[in-house]
Image: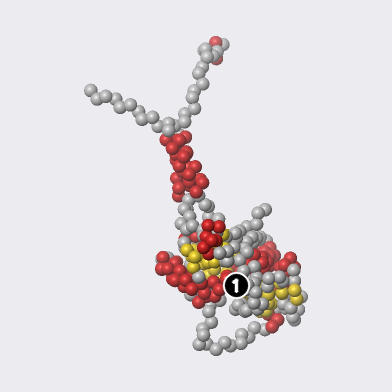
Amino acid sequence: MAKKTPAINSSSTADIAFLLLCYFLMTTTMGSHYGLSRRLPPMPDPNQKVEDQKVNRRNIIVVKINSADILAGTEAIDISLLKDKIKEFLSNPANDPNLPEKEVKEIEGYSKGTYPVSKGVISLQNDRGTSYQAYIAVQNELVKAVNELRDEFSMREFGKVYVALDETTQKIVRDCIPQNISEAEPKDVGNRR
Amino acid sequence: MSRFKKSGKKEMPGITSSSLSDIVFMLLFFFMVTTQMRETENKVKVTTPEASEVVKLERKDLNAYINIGSPTLAYQAQYGTDARIQLNDSFRTTDDIRDFIAAERDAKSEADRQLMTVSIRADQDVRMGIVTDVKQELRRCSALKIMYSARKPAK
């Protein structure tokens, strides 16, 4: 007669599992990677002659940063005012001849067909002594200006904020209000490291 | 009426704890799957700057990381406190970025190569000079999609 095997005491498996659980809880890092996405301009071909880019003066705003000051256009500006200046520059509500011109463009999928898209370009220049923190702060303000314009546009047209829209509508908004930030060729100004 | 009368003292049934281990195992598997071990040791101190308009990185596996910052205490005796570049596991200079990008490109599958993003994790106290050098080198290697690592400000 076969002997009955005694049942294995399984009450401690929970404890073991808890130990492992604690280990993974401690070591885990959730996907917490955030940042500002950018696209660098391609390197200019050395054989190609540098031709003067025909960008109208009124269409470009140069934002310069050095270790102490921010310069937007021609005047020094505080970072708290930068966003409003950029917004005014990009939207040009009064059609000021000194602010960027608008080009009536056909937007694919847009119910009204066309929208006057601003031709404004923000050119960002920094010197080598700028702190990274200041640089990101300025980048952040530029993105914030564009994002707020997009939000205003989406509220007006679709009654929702930009992030609440679906993919295709977001693309329409992106086409209408492009984010044109160019990071200019580095210039050695103020040789301070 | 005696039908509903309680017949003596009833014993409280013990709570079965046999499903406890199942629940714990389920949690365990969840964390085992989601966990990602840090594969490289940080040799430079990086505190990313704060920015409110950050976006989340879509695909972590398509990322190459470039760390810029001053060396941590253990390496300061050897390398000083000047800002340096760390690629993978060692201190490098801007000249090594080309090889690094090429190696990272090779590691990705054919379809994903276009989508590769280079994430610049620079310390907030770093000067822009070194970051500009890195950016110029990336442009030369035509790795044009970049991301400035930043964190959300604490509310």
Quadrant of the snapshot with the N terminus of chain A: top left
Quadrant of the snapshot with the C terminus of chain A: bottom right
Q: Chain of mark 1?
A: B
Percent x, y for residue B26? Answer: 46, 42
Vertical placement of residue A2 versus A163, above or below: above
Vertical placement of residue A183 versus B121, above or below: below
Scheme of image coloration: secondary structure
Where residue A150 sits, quadrant-wise, is bottom right
Vertical placement of residue A46 versus A87, above or below: below
Percent x, y for residue A118? Answer: 67, 76
**Amino acid found under the numbered disc labelled 1:** Gly
Q: Nearer the viewer, residue A101 or B90?
A: B90
Q: Nearer the viewer, residue A88 or A185?
A: A185
Where residue A68 sits, quadrant-wise, is bottom right
| Residue at image location 52% in from the left, 52% down from the top | A29
Q: Label 1: which residue? A: B129
Percent x, y for residue B84? Answer: 54, 66
Give the left or right position of residue B28, taking residue A129 as reference: left
| Residue at image location 33% in from the left, 26% down from the top | A6
| Residue at image location 75% in from the left, 71% down from the top | A77
